[in-house]
Each structure stands twice: as C-alpha cells, then as structure tokens.
Amino acid sequence: MADSSMARFYRDRGYLLVKGLIDKEEARAFREECHAVLARSRPSDPTWDSARQLTDSVTELRHCHDVQFHSAAFARLIVDPRFTDVAAAVMGSENVQLHHTKIFVKPAERGSPFPLHQDAAHFPHTRHTVGAAIFHFDDAPEEKGCVRVVPGSHQRGPLPHVEEGGWHLPLSQWPLEQAVPVEAEAGDVLFLSYLTVHGSGVNRAGEARTTLLVQFRDPEDRPADDVHRSRGQGMMLRGVDPLGGA
C-alpha cells in the first residue's frame, strides 16, 4: 500500500493522511472495542491544564495506555502490514519498533482540546525517526476536534516547550486556530513525525471522537532521556532489531 509519493509527502510536510487504511466495518468494530476497553478500565481524565485555557466550557477526555494488553484486537492491528508498511516507508527503515499505544476518546459535546506541541518534547530520541499513527474509528470533522497540524514544522527540529500545564508550545506564539485542520473519516490513519507541531480542538459534536494512537520508531533510534516507558515498548512490529534489544 505504501509508495514513494507517500514518503515524499511525509518528508516534506511532516504528516500524511492515508485514506481508508482499514475499511469502515473494521473501524466500527475497533470503535466498539475501544469503548468496551474503557468501560472495563478505571476512568481517568488526562486533559492538560493548559488545554483549559483554550475553551470556556468544561471538557474531558477518556484514555487507556498499552491497549494491546487489554484486547487482542489491538495486538493484531499494530502488526498489520497495512499499517507497518506505511510506517516503514515514512521512516525510511525496513524495521518498525513500538514505542507505545493509547486510546483517546473525546466525549460528545465536551471533548477536551490539545494545545499545539511536538511529541518530541515528551520522549526525545537521538535520530528523530519517531512517528505517530492516529487510527480514526469514527469520522473526525473539524466540529469533533480533529487533529490540526503546522505543515513543515518538523524541519525546525525540537522547539522549546512550556513544561507547566502539559509540555506545550507557548499559547500566544502558537495559537491552535492557525494550524491546519486534518479532517478524517472512519478508517483513515494520520501519520505524524514526532517533530511536527500539532494539536486538536474541542469536540462540540453530538458523537464521541474515537482514536487509537500508535507511536513507533526505528529500533536504531535510541531515547535521548529515560523519560517514557510503557508495557511492550521495544516490541518489533515489522522487521528485526539490529541492536538485539540493547
């Protein structure tokens, strides 16, 4: 499924929306699985304090880390070649290693936003190959708080972030509304470099926005700091680890 034009677009702009990577029926089944996992989990709200400055309304999020340990459906998905082949292509590596997974649900009418930020601020690596894949299990128009990106921002390298309130870029210098909305449909997957500046708006629609985040890397790209560990980190999703797990 992956081709050179995808890799070139990602390299130039720092993101790539792959339409229909999984079909609508699969997306519906994964959506149900996400909500079932959350129903079995202890509820928590990871809304950043800084996000509350972006809206006057009370908002919330629901999430779950390491989802492949909660449901085998996600264990199968993260090694699906439809996903891993694109991940390999955009990184320029035959080998794809897992960093972490996370379900994100923005509840209907009150789903929390995310200020603009780079994922690199949360788990820096030495070669900057780290990428994210956001699987959309229902439609994500702008009204539902779709992801917004700053195209080409990955070329600026790591940027200084404000630690207080969630490791975000300064709100006055990086207003969310100036980023480009990337509307998606159920079954679409958005690939992002961890250096690409991105965020998302409030879900004001009458339906939840349901996504799965998979962070991946080239296994030869080592963490710059020991700041983020997760269950399953280091699992090979495609290819081999040339470093032998070192």
Image (spheres, helix red, strand yellow):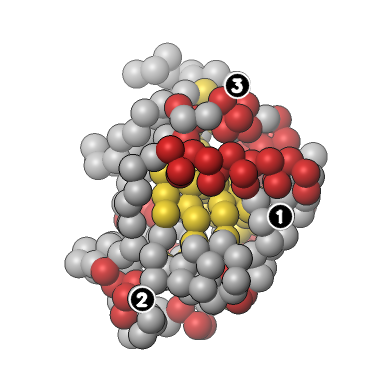
What label sits on residue 239 in the rendered view? 3
Residue for point 56% across, 52% down? 211
Q: Residues within 10 Å of mark 1 (few under 14, many from 20)?
A: many
Q: Residue at x 79, y 39 (%)?
A: 1
How crowded is the residue under tag 2: few (<14 C-alpha within 10 Å), some, or many (20+)? few
Residue at mark 1: 186
User: Disc 2 residue type?
Assistant: Val
Residue found at the very far left of the displayed protein: 164
The answer to which quarter of the image holds residue 192 is: bottom right
Do the CB atoms of the residues marked 1 and 2 lie less than 8 Å apart? no
Q: Which residue occupies the extreme front position in the image?
A: 39
Give the mark toward the camera: 3 or 2: 2
Of callouts 3 and 1, the N-terminal one: 1
The residue type indicated by label 1 comes to: Ala
Q: Residue at x 36, y 85 (%)?
A: 56
Q: Position of residue 170 (x, y in %)?
A: 30, 76
Q: Is residue 26 above or below residue 13?
A: above
- Left or right: 113 with respect to 22? left
